Each structure stands twice: as C-alpha cells, then as structure tokens.
C-alpha cells in the first residue's frame, strides 16, 4: 500500500517549497550588481580556460553505453538475489547461464580494449 | 487517501505532459534533454503510485541515471552543441499536430470511449496472480519467464557488441586487436630484446603495434 | 514462502535455437582471441558450420510437436521447416559476405556472429508462443540488423541507413510494447493460446473487446513495419540502398520471414475470434502493398532500389498466404513463398555484389548493359532470378505465386488474388527491363566483373534451387504440406 510513502511525499513537497521559496526570495530581495568577474563562467575559482562547451571524444559515449548494458544486467540480478535461497541449485544454474552469456560479452569488450583509457 | 492518490496522479500526469511537450519544443537541445530527464522522473513517480516500487527504482536507476547521461554525452559529441536558435518545430506544426492527433485518435478512441475504467477485467483463464514486487519477479525469472530472461541476456550481449562495433574508436583508425597467439609471441619477443626492463612497458607495445597497423 | 518448483524444461525442443545462440557466443570469443585480422573468413566458415549443425540437430525433431518453458515456446513442423529456411538464408548470406567484406574494406569478425544472432531471433519468432517472446525475438533480429546496416562505416549512406532504420524501428518497437500492454490488460495473459482461449470462451464485453482491439491494432502496426507492408514501407528503399549488399539481401528475406511467421501465429492462435476486424484491414494493407511496391519499382533506375521496392511487393504476396493461414493452403503457400523468394532474391543480390567494385556502386540499370557479352553465365543467372521474381514459368517464382494466389482465391479473398495477378503483370515490366538490358544492348566498356568462390557457390545454389523447384516442385510441396498440418488443426 501507499501509506508508507506519504512521509516521502510530504518531504518532497517541503523540499520543492524550500527550493522555490529561497530562489524567489533571493531574486526579490538580493541586490543586482554585475561585475565582469561575476559574469564569467564558474570554474571552481580558477580563471576559465577555453570555452565551456566543447566536443568530447567518442570514447565517453562507449563507456556510457557499456555502463547501461551492465546497469541493466545488475537490475536483473537484484530480484534474483532476494529469493536465491528458495530457488536452490536450479536457480543458481539458471542465473549462471544468464551470467555466462553476459560474461562472454564482458570478456569480448575487454579483449577488444574498450575498457582501456588512453 | 483515495483523493490524495487522485490528486497526486493528476499533478504527476500534468508534470509529465508538460515536460514531454517541452522536450519537443524548447530550442536548446541540452534543455530538451533535461526536460526529458524530468519526464523520466515523472514516469518513475507514476510507477510508485501504481505500487510498482521495484519498477520505479529501476526507472530512476536506468533512465534517470544512465540513459540521461548517454543522451547528454550524445549531445556533447555533436558539432553544434546547444543548437541555440534552432527551431525544433516546423512552421506547419499545427497541421502535423492535427494529423498526428487524428491518427492516434482513430486507433485509440474506440478503446478509450468504450472502456469502463475502474472495472477490473474478468479474471483471465489459468493465469497465476499478477507479479508484485521484486521477490515475485525473481521467482518469475526461473519459473514462467525463464526463456524471456535468458533471451534478454543474449539481447544485452548483442547490444554490447553493437556498442563496440559501431562506436568504439573511430573505426577509420581502428586499433588492431591481437589474437592470443600473437600476444604471447609479442611478449616473448619483448622478453628476448629487453630482458632488463620488462615491467613498465607492459601495455605500450600493443598500442604501437596498432598505430603501425592502422597506418597501413 | 513455499518452495519453488521449476517447471520441466525440454531443451530438445529448442535445440536448433540453442545451437545457434551457443555457437554464436562461442564464435565471438574464438574470433577475438584466436583468429587474426585479415583471416576473418575463417570466422565466416565457422559460422556456416554452426548453422549447418543447427540444421542437422533439427532433423530428429521432424514430426515432433510440443511446447516447453511453460508454453512460451512451441515446436511444430511449421516452426521447424521455417527454421531450416532461416538457416539456409543465414548460410547463403554469409557465403556471399565472405569476399564482399574484405573487398569493401569493412571486414570485422563480429559480422558473422551477428548474423547468427539475427538468425536466432528469426527462429525465436517462428517458435514463440508468447507475446513477450515474440517481442524479444523481433528485438534480437532488429538490433542485430541496426548494427549490420551501419557496418560499412566510412560510407555515409550506410550510416544514414542505420540511423533511419534505428529511429523508425525503435518507434515500431514502442507500438509493439504498447499493444502488448493493452492486450494484457484485456485478457490478463501474454500467452497466445491463453489469449485465444480467453477471447473464444467468454463474452468479452465492450470493455475488454475494445482494449483487445486497440492492442491488436498496435501490434499489427509493429508487424507491418517489420514486414514492410504498404503504409509502413517508407524506410525500405533508403535502408536497403545504404546497407552493405549482403545485409540488404539478408534483411529483405529475413525480417519478412521472421515477422510474418510470428504474425501467422498471432492471428490464428491469439486473435482468431477477431477475424472480422483484422481481415479487412490486413487485406487492404496487402492490396496496397502489392500496388505500391510494384508501381514504385517501375520508377527505379537503380537496381538495388528496384529490388527494395520489389521486396515490398513480394511482402504482399507472402501476406496472401498469411491471411488465409486458417486453411490448409495458407501456411503452405506462406512457407513455400518464403523459401522461393529467399532463393531468388538472395541470388539476385549476389549478382549485384558480383558487379560491385570496391567502394563504387554499380547498380544502375546501365551497368547491366550487355552483361551477357561480358559475363554470359552471370547474365543467365540474373535472368533466372528476374524471371523467378516476376513469376514466369518454369521458374520456382511462378509456382510460388500460383500457390499464393490460389490459396487466397480458395480462402475467400478472390478480389485480392485478382489484385495480385494484375500487380504481377506490372512487375514483369521492370524485371524484364533488366533482362533486356543484359541481353539486347551493347556493353559500355566496363571491365568484366570478377567472380569469386563464395559468390559463385551462392549464385549456383540459388539458381539451381530456383530452377529445380520450378521444374520438380513435388518434394518441396510434400515437405510444405506436412509442415502446415499442425497449424491448420
């Protein structure tokens, strides 16, 4: 049932309220004096180097895609982990087959060097 | 309680619809991606409302967590990143909207009009109780959904191969992947030529090999 | 909680599928670890061996009928025969790729395991008895094909084709899932037999009937997209033109065979009671498909595009068999047409590959000018394929078309059969145009295309099959008739 989530809902509403409230308040009350330094892109206190927006190499994308594949795999493990005692050895075998298929994919990408970062 | 659920649903539904509309109408692609993430979040909340907690968590984990990162990376790969000032909609978008609505309505209108919502359908023949909760799902994986579960594993592997084949390195300067035999041979050669400094150059020669191979 | 019993699983019933998947996964590793770059043909040979083994494993299953995995997967002669046809398609496609890939400088070992995975998706479609299994089968097939379509990387058309196919395909997949959800909402099951039983035994009432209809409509849209029925065919010409030629050949017969095999099951196991609703819709789509495909092909000067449009037209003829699959003749016509179409079309694409030099496309009609004087045998083979696709006796294509049209006629769709005859007459025009170019015009100074072993084998097998089935169709008829028994009953 949904009752346990009512506090979560209330917490969420409070959080949204505080966020909106604070931003509105500072927008209404805060002084607006812009200096060049203030308008510069924020780079953790350093002077900004180069444009903030630039193209990234494609390898980030490959890593992200591999991450998604294994993310989904882990999601499949989770329900299994909850009941693996009940399932006994047969369940382990079934999970093993699933795992081996993905392991093959993992070995393949490792050998291909997709996990290497140069 | 019922009223609270109804109101929550209304708020979430409006939120999702607005976010989805923003995705296709804002001019900054990054903003569109952020709205899409908001949309994913709303769907997760909807799952929560339907008491599918596991699905809600998965939605947040995969869509909000991983897919959104992928989308942002994809945008950052493109030449014109923000796409400022690029109209996503054509000038004739009302016409398109009308046609799309019409087509969608022809398919779904009969369903929606004749449907008496809130009336649960008669129990189906010989089907077990609906799956509720991750533990049930875990049991389903080895029981009634065994074949689907295994096929999903294969499907994920295929997707992984695809990711590497399509995007790994720019394929024009493809790295040469050595076979096991070639790797051992290389290692042996290296040990013969420079027996004194074996460790630090471990990974290097493979790379050099690849460069020379790709320049062929 | 009570202890769990895992239902009995008969792996024997999915043996061919199992062999293909296991072999493909193993081959992936063997390829990366042991087969050096430049000798990837070896991977191709191993893949062919795997498909052959899978076919042999299926032999003892002949005549066996049964379902396993809790009724999610079914084996019957219908599925088994289709499995063999799909394996044959896979073998022929790989054979024609062996030399094509290095010639185009796009050779990567993953190509062959990917084709095997695609074949496994097709087999799953033929065997699936559950909507989710069918969805996974379609996705396995499609995702593999997205990758293969974009395989010719430096070529922009290939990237373009992959992109178009992916976006539209993902959209169609969305329709499929939505449809499954609605059907599940109406009947509470995703199993085809249970949906059918539920719809037959009970008065559905407005509520569930409309839900079921909505769901069925969505699912039909997804299938129509995969099989390229008329209003959903827009992607075909661009995708076929852009993708590597063997992949286009594989797609043209593979996706049709797989998706329509699944459609047969869906229509006649899950939705037979809704016959009155889907039959007019599908009949309309089929008529439109035949007309659009064949008329579209006339305008094409590019033979590869022409074959793409012709494949749309042929989807319509295959659909003739699908729609009357409730009768004995329906599934027979379906299997027979798929087999014959696979042979003729793969052969025609193999000829295209033979004419294709590295990086340069030679698919214009003019490139076929005087082919007879340059390469007489190649021209004769192409003529056989063109005659077969046009449905001219004594080729197999004639028998297949005759079979499909009579099945539709007897199955109560005479007007559709008439449309089929008329469109075939139109189709003859553009197929014969190629033949005329090859035999009756002077060559335009093109160097003779070189044939290699894989292609030769492919073309010879396809041409021989087309002729032999056309002349002595009896053994194939017998096979097809026995395959169709289980489904009709």
Image: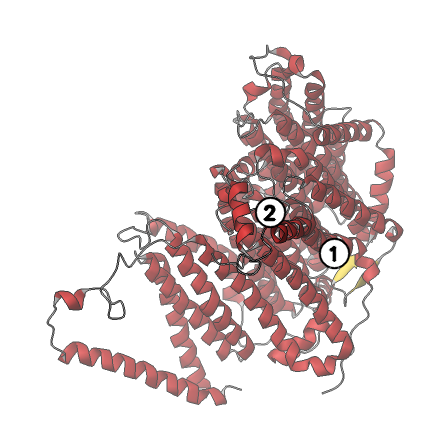
Q: Is residue C450 visible?
A: yes
- Quarter the N terminus of chain C occupies: bottom right
**Observer-nearest residue: C272 or C414?**
C272
Label whose residue precedes the other's in the sequence (1 or 2): 1
Label 1: state its secondary structure: helix
Mark drawn on residue C22: 1
**Quadrant (top left/top right/bottom left/bottom right) for the C terminus of chain C:** bottom right
Identity of the residue drawn at 60% across and 47% down: C145
In the image, is B95 to the left or to the right of B142? left
Judged left or right of residue B167, residue C44 is right
Measuring from the top left, give residue B65's x and y in whole percent: 46, 69
Please determine if labels 1 and 2 lie on a single subunit.
yes
Question: What is the chain identity of the residue bearing mark 2?
Answer: C
x, y percent for residue C451 = 68, 24
User: A118 or C236, which lies in front?
Assistant: A118
Give me the chain letter of mark 1: C
Q: Give residue B149's quadrant in the image.
A: bottom right
Q: Name the colour scheme.
A: secondary structure
Task: Give the label, 1 or 2, closer to the camera.
Answer: 1
> Which residue is identified by label 2?
C145
Choose top left, top right, bottom left or bottom right for residue C436.
top right
Which dot marks residue C410?
none
Q: Residue furthest front?
A: B196
Q: Nearer the viewer, residue C32 or C344?
A: C32
Query: What x and y, as percent, mark residue A23?
Result: 23, 78
Q: Is residue C415 visible?
A: no
Instruction: Reply above or below: B16 against C241.
Output: below
Cα–Cα span, label 1 and label 2: 19 Å
Where residue C285 appears, x then y in whole percent?
A: 59, 43
User: Disc 1, disc 2: CB below 8 Å?
Assistant: no
Give residue C478's quadrant in the image. Answer: top right
């Amino acid at each position: 049932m949904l009752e346990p989530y009512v506090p979560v809902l209330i917490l969420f509403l409070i959080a949204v309220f505080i966020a909106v409230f604070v931003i509105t308040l500072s927008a209404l009350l805060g002084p607006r004096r812009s200096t060049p330094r203030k308008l510069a892109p924020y780079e953790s206190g350093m002077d900004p180097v180069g444009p903030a927006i630039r193209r990234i190499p494609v390898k980030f994308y490959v890593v992200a895609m591999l991450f998604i594949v294994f993310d989904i795999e882990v999601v499949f493990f989770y329900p299994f982990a909850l009941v693996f005692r009940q399932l006994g050895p047969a369940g382990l075998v079934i999970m093993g087959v699933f795992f081996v298929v993905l392991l093959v994919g993992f070995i393949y990408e490792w050998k291909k060097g997709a996990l290497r970062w140069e | 309680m019922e009223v609270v659920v109804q109101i929550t649903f209304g708020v979430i539904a409006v939120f999702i619809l607005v976010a989805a509309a923003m995705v296709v109408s804002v001019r900054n692609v990054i903003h569109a991606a952020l709205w899409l993430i908001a949309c994913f979040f709303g769907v997760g909340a909807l799952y929560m409302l339907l008491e599918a907690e596991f699905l809600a968590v998965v939605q947040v984990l995969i869509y909000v967590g991983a897919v959104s990162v992928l989308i942002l990376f994809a945008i950052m790969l493109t030449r014109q990143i923000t796409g400022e000032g690029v109209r996503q909609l054509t000038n004739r978008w009302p016409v398109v909207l009308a046609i799309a609505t019409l087509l969608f309505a022809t398919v779904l209108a009969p369903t929606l009009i004749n449907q008496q919502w809130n009336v649960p359908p008669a129990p189906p023949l010989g089907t077990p109780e609906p799956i509720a909760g991750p533990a049930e799902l875990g049991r389903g994986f080895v029981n009634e959904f065994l074949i689907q579960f295994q096929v999903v594993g294969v499907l994920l592997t295929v997707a992984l191969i695809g990711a590497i084949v399509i995007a790994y390195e720019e394929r024009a300067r493809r790295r040469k992947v050595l076979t096991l035999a070639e790797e051992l041979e290389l290692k042996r050669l290296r040990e013969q030529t420079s027996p004194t400094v074996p460790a630090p150059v471990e990974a290097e020669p493979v790379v050099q090999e690849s460069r020379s191979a790709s320049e062929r | 909680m009570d202890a769990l019993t895992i239902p009995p699983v008969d792996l024997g019933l999915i043996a061919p599928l199992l062999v293909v998947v296991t072999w493909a996964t193993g081959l992936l590793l063997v390829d990366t670890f042991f087969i050096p770059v430049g000798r990837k043909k070896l991977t191709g040979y191993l893949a062919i061996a795997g498909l052959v083994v899978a076919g042999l494993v299926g032999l003892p299953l002949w005549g066996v009928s049964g379902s396993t995995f809790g009724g999610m997967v079914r084996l019957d002669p219908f599925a088994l025969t289709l499995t063999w046809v799909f394996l044959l398609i896979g073998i022929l496609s790989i054979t024609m790729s062996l030399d094509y890939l290095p010639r185009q400088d796009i050779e990567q070992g993953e190509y062959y395991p990917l084709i095997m995975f695609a074949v496994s998706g097709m087999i799953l479609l033929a065997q699936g008895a559950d909507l989710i299994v069918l969805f996974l089968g379609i996705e396995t097939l499609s995702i593999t094909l997205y990758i293969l379509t974009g395989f010719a990387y430096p070529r922009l058309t290939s990237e373009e084709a992959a992109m178009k196919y992916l976006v539209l395909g993902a959209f169609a997949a969305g329709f499929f899932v939505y449809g499954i959800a609605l059907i599940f909402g109406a009947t509470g099951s995703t199993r085809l037999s249970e949906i059918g039983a539920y719809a037959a035994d009970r008065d559905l009432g407005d509520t569930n009937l409309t839900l079921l209809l909505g769901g069925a409509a969505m699912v039909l849209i997804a299938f129509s997209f995969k099989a390229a029925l008329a209003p959903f065919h827009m992607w075909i010409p661009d995708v076929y033109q852009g993708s590597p030629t063997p992949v286009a050949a594989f797609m043209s017969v593979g996706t049709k065979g797989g998706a329509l095999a699944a459609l047969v099951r869906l229509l006649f196991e899950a939705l037979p009671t809704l016959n009155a609703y889907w039959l007019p819709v599908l009949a309309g789509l089929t008529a439109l498909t035949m007309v659009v495909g064949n008329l579209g092909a006339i305008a094409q000067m590019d033979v590869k595009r022409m074959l793409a449009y012709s494949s749309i037209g042929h989807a319509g003829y295959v659909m003739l068999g699908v729609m009357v699959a409730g009768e004995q003749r329906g599934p027979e016509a379906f299997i027979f047409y798929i087999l014959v179409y696979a042979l003729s079309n793969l052969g025609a694409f193999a000829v295209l590959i033979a004419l294709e030099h590295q990086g340069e496309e030679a698919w214009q009609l003019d490139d076929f000018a005087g082919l007879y004087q340059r390469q007489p045998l190649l021209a004769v083979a192409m003529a056989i394929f063109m005659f077969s696709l046009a449905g001219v006796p004594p080729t197999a294509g004639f028998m297949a078309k005759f079979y499909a049209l009579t099945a539709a006629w007897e199955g109560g769709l005479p007007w559709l059969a008439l449309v089929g005859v008329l469109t075939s007459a139109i189709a003859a025009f553009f197929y014969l145009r190629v033949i005329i170019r090859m035999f009756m015009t002077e060559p335009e100074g093109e160097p003779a295309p070189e044939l290699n072993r894989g292609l030769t084998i492919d073309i010879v097998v396809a041409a021989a099959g087309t002729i032999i089935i056309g002349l002595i169709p009896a053994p194939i008829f017998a096979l097809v008739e026995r395959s169709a028994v289980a489904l009709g009953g």
